[in-house]
Amino acid sequence: MIVTLTINPSLDRTVTLDRLEPGRVLRTSAPVLEPGGKGVNVTRALAANGHASIAVVPVAGAEGSELGRLLDAAGVDGRYVAVSGRTRSNLSIVGGDGIVTKLNEPGSPLDADDLLAIATALRGTVRPGDWLVVSGSGTPGLIADDVRALIEAATAAGASVAVDTSGDPLAAAVAAAPRILKPNRDELAELVGRPLRTIADVLEAAREVRDSGVAIVLVTLGAAGAVLVADDTELVGESPVARPVSPVGAGDCLLAGFLSKYGSDESDLVGAFTEGLTWGAAATGLPGSAVPSPSDLHPENVQLVWQPDLDRPLVAG
């Protein structure tokens, strides 16, 4: 079983317009409302492709109720934890040129009772042999020790942990030695304290994180693909998308695809990496934060680059 924890979930609204013009009154399309949050997206992608997953989701206020309703309607197995404050709302604006502008609210702080309720829900959900995915941004005021404690508790319960977060929670996660760490390039650069301009830079930084006790470092590079570094395996891969629509949630789908294979066969890193690239690429061809279904997946488009140009500059994003 793959359990996900989204500490700071959201309602995601996506609107489209011909052109984004600051300072003008603009007419948009009707909004598309979707459940949001990185861990939520991981569970949604797994469920859409027939893999068992449970999403542990703190919810609050009317927005939290709507988030739970949307997840139930999508057939997601959710464990909803009532917390204080309100669930945040995020807005994605898609221009006629396909460029996405995303406006994310910070969310409400979690107090000690809220954190205890989340930890209790995890203890009641995670079983030995499960995977726990801790994914997404933290709430305001969340400290590194809170994140580390959740990871260490899951590990002590016999679960394997994958983490996809940023900033101080990412550094705290490394200290707790999860099995998998999935930063993007900017997050990895912040973690190691230097810019990562080439594939060689990314590989070197990923090796440093692996050497600190993380078994697998899976780095997403946007349109440039992804890099995987493990003890005895290093992979670079791409999955070009002819007509990208939205990058929102693509990294979450990549992690979901990777775990869909690796969770059942840890001997096949190449197969898991290929599956992750397939799911991530498929997500970029869908609107908003929609997740791919089996008919959207095209593994034949994945290209493993066995001899990459290590010094090729990586473009932003």
Image (cartoon, helix red, strand yellow):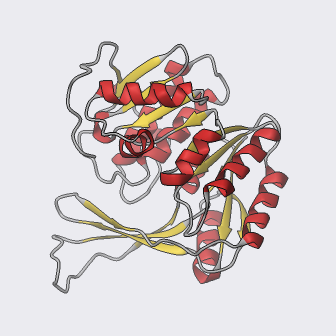
Residue 78, image x and y in percent? Answer: 70, 60
Q: Residue at x 54, y 33 (%)?
A: 258
Compared across the picture, whether 212 is left or right of 316 comes to: right
Q: Is residue 243 visible?
A: yes
Picture layout, residue 131 above or below residue 206: below
Q: How many numbered tags mark residues here? A: 0
State which quadrant residue 315 falls in: top left
State which quadrant residue 314 falls in: top left
Q: Residue at x 52, y 58 (%)?
A: 137
Residue 131, image x and y in percent? Answer: 70, 39
As drawn, which residue projects farthest toward the bottom?
Answer: 25
Q: Residue at x 60, y 26 (%)?
A: 215
Quadrant (top left/top right/bottom left/bottom right) for the N terminus: top right
Picture layout, residue 188 above or below residue 207: below
Compared across the picture, whether 163 is left or right of 159 comes to: left
Compared across the picture, whether 270 is left or right of 145 comes to: left
Picture layout, residue 141 above or below residue 194: below
For this rendering, which residue is in front, 169 or 90?
169
As drawn, which residue projects farthest toward the front?
Answer: 193
For this rendering, which residue is in front, 120 or 20?
120
Residue 177, image x and y in percent? Answer: 64, 35
Picture layout, residue 209 above or below residue 118: above
Residue 10, image x and y in percent? Answer: 53, 68
Q: Is residue 48 visible?
A: no
For this rendering, which residue is in front, 27 or 73?
27
